[in-house]
Amino acid sequence: MTNTPTYISLLNAISVTETSAGEIFENWADSVTDKKLEKTLRLIEMREKEHGIAFAKRMLELGYEVRPDGSDPLEELRKIASSNRSELSKLKALKYNKAPASPDIFDGMFSDKTIDPVTGGLLGRYIAEERDTGKLLRSECQRLQDKEKKAKERLKAKAAK
């Protein structure tokens, strides 16, 4: 019998988390009225779902199955995304109004030198897409902040007349 690859728990965690994130972003996208934000959330939803499936598939290829532990790894995201807050308030609560942390959560993923080339390629694409997702959400947050600021300026100008 072969030894379990040291990175199986990482693949499992990514699959479980990304599958959950896909559901959260789908529900969030269903509830927004801003078409540009909805489009961004739909893209992210598709990425997250695809990541969940891709990592589950990789685990099957390696002879393992995804095993959710019953916890909700994205409880805070779920609460914020499904809340009655404004879309801008949601993005701010998720800290998309701030620069990304450095180093980020992904920086250590390649520290395991036993990762095979196929898994490494999958992880590389996943990391690049996750970082891009952060950029997209920060851009949407900035756009909504600018939109809110312009609306306030118009109201203030109208009140001054």
Image: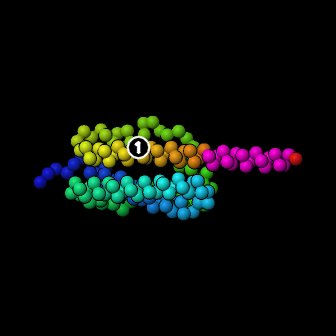
SS assignment for the magenta stretch, majority: helix
Question: Does 122 appear in magenta?
Answer: no
Q: Using the rendered view, name the quadrant where residue 56 is placed.
A: bottom left
Dot 1: what SS?
Answer: helix
Number of residues whose C-alpha sits closer than 10 Å to that of mark 1, classed few (under 14), some (14–19) or many (20 or more): few
Specify the amino acid type for callout 1. Ala
Q: Using the rendered view, name the quadrant where residue 20 is placed.
A: bottom left
Q: Is residue 72 above or below residue 115?
A: below
Q: Depth check: give the residue in front, 42 or 18.
A: 42
Magenta stretch: give its range: 143-160
Question: Does 147 appear in magenta?
Answer: yes
In the image, 101: left or right of 91?
A: left
Q: Is residue 84 above or below residue 124?
A: below
Residue 76 seen anywhere in this rendered image of the structure: no
Residue 105 position, x and y percent, is 40, 42
In the image, 45: left or right of 122?
A: right
Q: Which residue is mark 1?
A: 128
Q: In the rendered view, how is the structure colored? A: rainbow
